[in-house]
Image (spheres, helix red, strand yellow):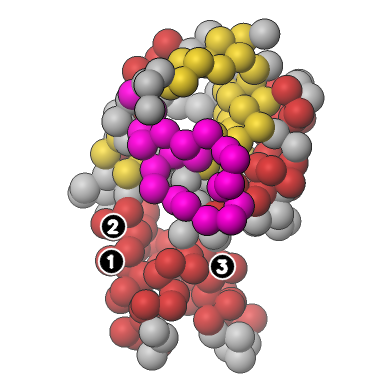
Amino acid sequence: MGSLELAAAAALFDMDGTLVDSTAVVEAIWRDFCRDHGVDEAVLVPWSHGRRTSDTVRHFLPDVPDDELGAIVAEYEIREQNTMTGIVEVPGARTLLESIELPWAVVTSAPRELAVRRMRAAGLPEAPVLVPADEIERGKPDPEGYLRAAELLGVDVRECVAFEDAEPGVLSALGSGARVVVVGRLDSEVTSGLPVVPDLTSVHVRGR
């Protein structure tokens, strides 16, 4: 498609897959998890995209006691924090963020420390507002993160445009009332009728 011109009160961005290309790193770590815990990677890896590590571990290890589950989550989050090789920007992300002239935020399924490290590793500017997974009660697809971001920016979420690449994130953003742009190749019932861009190179957002 050609250039996508948008007007909004604020822009809300998912991170992994939308601003930061971390797919290879994330999927490699989840494949390790599957081997370690006897889980089918063909099922887990697609399900995990756009979700918090804790939600994925809990979903696939439902019988593990809470204290043990917490230790497992911490182990794999540390692995992610220590793996920055191969983290790059999604094409166009840096140019868009450095030129944007309206309030913006990042709403991510990663914890704060990991989100900050990945944004830096990809050469992206620090988000004025960051809503990470470890500072909300309910992760995507719940809309809490996007509602929190709009509140922190002081704007009506219905006047925001959200950029997402994974189904849980699209559902989260739609549930909040934001307009949604799909970044990447996601094609499902939830993306029907939504604008889709391969990356951020041809996206332009201006204030209202």
Give the SS element for disc 3: helix
Identify the mark nearer the N-term, 3 or 1. Answer: 1
Amino acid type, label 3:
Ser
In the rendered image of this protein, does residue 48 appear above or below residue 13? below
**Badge 3 density bin: few <14, some 14–19, many ≥20, Cα 10 Å:** many
Residue under pointer 1: 28
For residue 125, which quarter of the picture? top left
Expressed as whole percent of the image width and height from the top left, the position of residue 166 reads 50, 52
Q: Position of 138 compared to 89: left or right?
A: right
Q: Main secondary structure of the magenta part?
A: loop
**Badge 2 density bin: few <14, some 14–19, many ≥20, Cα 10 Å:** some
> Foreground: 37 or 180?
180
In the rendered image of this protein, does residue 6 appear above or below residue 208? below
For the N terminus, the quadrant is top left
Q: Position of 38 compared to 71: left or right?
A: left
Mark number, residue 106? none
Amino acid type, label 1:
Ala
* Magenta highlight range: 182-201
> Foreground: 192 or 67?
192
Residue under pointer 2: 25
Expressed as whole percent of the image width and height from the top left, the position of residue 80 reads 36, 58
